[in-house]
Image (cartoon, rainbow, N blue to C red):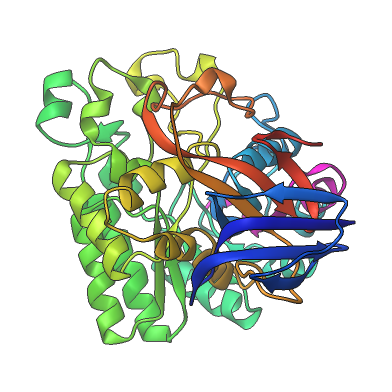
Amino acid sequence: MRILIKNGIVVNKIECGTMNILVEDGVITRIEQDLSAHADEVIDAAGCYVLPGLVDAHCHLRDPGFEYKEDIVSGTRSAAIGGFTSVACMANTNPVADNKAVIGYITDKARREGAVRVFPIGAMTKGLKGEELAEIGEMKQAGIVGVSDDGRSVENSAVMKKVMQYANMFGVSVICHSEDSRLAEDGSMNEGALSTIMGLRGIPEACEEIMIARDLILSEYLNIPVHICHVSTALGVELIRNAKQRGVKVTAETCPHYFTLTEKACEGFNTLAKVNPPLRTEKDVEAIINGLCDGTIDIIATDHAPHHEDEKNVEFDKAAFGIVGFETALPLAYTALVKTGRLDIRQLAEKMSINPSAMLKIDKGELKEGKTADITVFNPEEKYTIDTTKFVSKSKNSPFHGYPAYGRVTATIVEGRIVVKDGKLNI
């Protein structure tokens, strides 16, 4: 099949300009200004950005075990609508993705039924218990690109040291959830004046920062790369910034809700704004944005965490943590960062495609002749109001309903297949 994308502003790491792209049999064969060729499908991208297919380095597809929240089919379709062509899913499934059998199930189902590429992340420890290493080598053979006990930290430093050493031996990324669970003490929102007024147990910023510092120290001691998940605090950003200046091999991510919302979104006991780590303060939001601007934070991930409405429609302290993010990540990031002049479109492509591909060590994130055709076409000037009732995801747990945004994905091409066309699923 031949696809011609014409008149779009092609965004790559080095250059950005109006070009035409020809795709043949799943591969980009030509990128030229004056390109005229017969094609089975023609996409007129005038006024749109043509981006390397977005790569989400951190999501939860809930499959196997929690398919009532999301599954590989619905989750990857939601990702496609959001412009993602590749996603890396976390291991906190049921059963836990801590062995080659579960990893094999995920990769096989994704290959047969997924709308986008799925790269599993295996558990660091068996059962996510933080005690005994999972079979990292066998999981690597089955297809993992990283290891993480996301949702929990490996609090035993000796075990974490072994995780880093073994993962490094097999060339898979070490992806760290930073939380001291004892210090968190079953809190449900950011600890501060607002949590006190609301009568809720708070989660101090220090419980995240202590574990970030621990993992940075281990990384520096072992000279092994480490990736820090969903950074939410100002001190967390500064710890990572200082480590990078010392030459520590660290990358870091944040999520759109950490640079667009504060703890005030929880007012009225709004459980849709309950997320882990929790939404923080204005100071933290500004620090996160500054970290994105100066390169301290390398990646914007979604931490797409679907939940059934019954798990949110309860008392705040009993509600599940998590926000769905596939279908809002790009417009939120564009609106908050590019429209405001904090980042340019090339920098946004780095954060959402190029850098996550590099961290996961997958051959994605580039529009280049000879490369697989993973492409996102994005109309930056379409202004609209986010409507969670129209999400493709099974779950609608997002605090962004009614939120004004700029930018909509008009086409998503995955390995030469048009899975989203004119903003709608094409599969």
Q: Going by the image, does 178 lie left or right of 235?
A: right
Residue 43 horizontal/vertical position (percent): 72, 48
Q: Nearer the viewer, residue 161 or 262?
A: 262
Q: Is residue 340 left or right of residue 169?
A: left
| Image spot of residue 379 (x, y percent) | 52, 44
Image coords of residue 396 (percent x, y): 53, 23
Can residue 144 be seen in this snapshot? no
Residue 229 part of the magenta segment: no
The residues colored magenta run 105-129
Question: In the rendered view, does 412 fall on the left or right side of 57?
Answer: right
Q: Residue at x 45, y 19 (%)?
A: 312
Q: Relative to 423, does residue 266 appear above or below in the rendering?
A: above
User: Hey, which quadrant is residue 53 in on the image?
Assistant: bottom right
Residue visible at 55% across and 73% down in the picture: 358
Residue 199 higher or lower than 20, as above or below: above
Instruction: Look at the image and tell me in which quarter the N terminus lies.
Output: bottom right
Residue drawn at point x = 88 percent, y = 63 percent: 25
